[in-house]
Amino acid sequence: MRQIFDLTGKIALVTGGAGIIGSQVVRGLAEFGAVVIIADINKDKGESLAQELNIELNANKAYSCFVDVTSEESVQNMVSYVQNKFNSIDILHNNAAGKSNDLDAFFKEFEEYDLEQWKDIMDADLTSMFLVAREVGKVMKQQEIKGSIIQTASIYAVVAPDQRIYEGSYYLDREINTPAVYSTAKSGVIGLTKYLSAYWGKSGIRVNAITPGGIESGQNDTFKHKYSERVPLGRMAKAEEMVGAVVYLASDASSYVTGQNIIVDGGLSVW
């Protein structure tokens, strides 16, 4: 049964591959045998991670590729690069999401939220998923062996943020909250996942989502304490705890699983 998790010979594309979750996922996919393409807007960080992985694994398992997932042309160039170099895309982790360049606007109260800011975040967190899935899906449909697409949603696509946990909470030295546009965009990711699973089911392409709970990544102690009190397991997640779900959905272990959203949240959503 261990062999059904083996990804040897598979070509895996991970957008946002140099980020908090993506960097752990590419490592996990590579360790299970896949060749991984680290696609990220931060080209230097992607190249550095690819070099690091190849040294660790003593093999040319990792490659890097620039992508701006909000640009149709950039997404098409990314897919063309992977297809031309490897002739297939077996696994897509559609993971990249954007942050605002104007954090004051991003964290604005709902009643004062700017329409252009809303559009920018929707482009970065939802329209980008459409662009990447569309281009990769075209490739997968043409392949003899169909692929698996895994899309990253968020716990705040499943439950509403508890506003009480943000009192006195900071991330990287600034007050934080979760704006409505983020929850809305990530809810759209789950909707897109379900739609594509039905649309591409006859083509043999599986489409699923993972929903991470809150990941510890620089929040202050107040936030970590308040968030952890809401979680049955009593703590925030670690980024590497998302890897198992992605490997499962990428592999033949989930060959009859499509249209699902695997929630990795320590139990937060049960309440």
Image: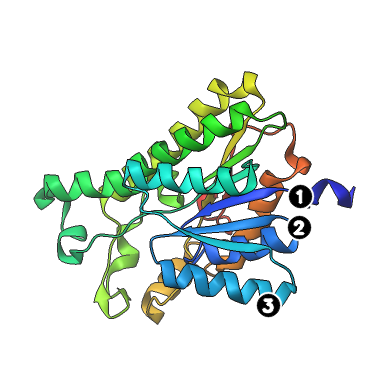
Do the numbered discs 2 and 3 sit on residues whose CB atoms are within 8 Å? no
| Residue 192 shown left or right of residue 139 in the figure | left
Horizontal arrangement in the rendering, residue 36 relative to residue 161 (left or right)? right
Left or right of 123? Residue 267 is: right
Color style of the picture: rainbow
> Distance between the Cα atoms at labels 2 and 3?
15 Å
Q: Amino acid at mark 1?
A: Gly
**Residue shown at the point (78%, 43%) measured from the top left:** 253
- Cα gap from disc 2 to disc 1, whole angstroms: 7 Å
Q: Is residue 84 visible?
A: yes
- Judging depth in this view, the residue of 107 and 192 nearest the camera is 192
Residue flagged by tag 2: what amino acid is it?
A: Gly
For the residues bearing labels 2 and 1, Cβ distance under 8 angstroms: yes
Q: Is residue 145 above or below residue 85?
A: above
Residue, disc 1: 9
Q: Position of residue 189 (x, y in %)?
A: 43, 39
Residue projecting furthest to the top? 202
Q: Quadrant of residue 122?
A: top left
Task: Say the numbered circle drawn on residue 112.
Answer: none
Q: Secondary structure at mark 2?
A: loop
The amino acid sitting under disc 3 is Ile
Q: Give the label on residue 33, or none.
A: 2
Image coordinates for residue 245, horizontal then vertical, percent: 65, 52
- The disc, 2 or 3, on the residue closer to the chain's N-terminal end is 2
In terms of secondary structure, where does tag 3 sit?
A: helix
Which tag, 1 or 3, sits closer to the chain's start? 1
Q: From the image, state whether disc 2 or disc 1 is nearer to you.
A: 1
User: Dot 3 corresponds to which residue?
Assistant: 55
Q: Residues within 10 Å of mark 1 (few under 14, many from 20)?
A: few
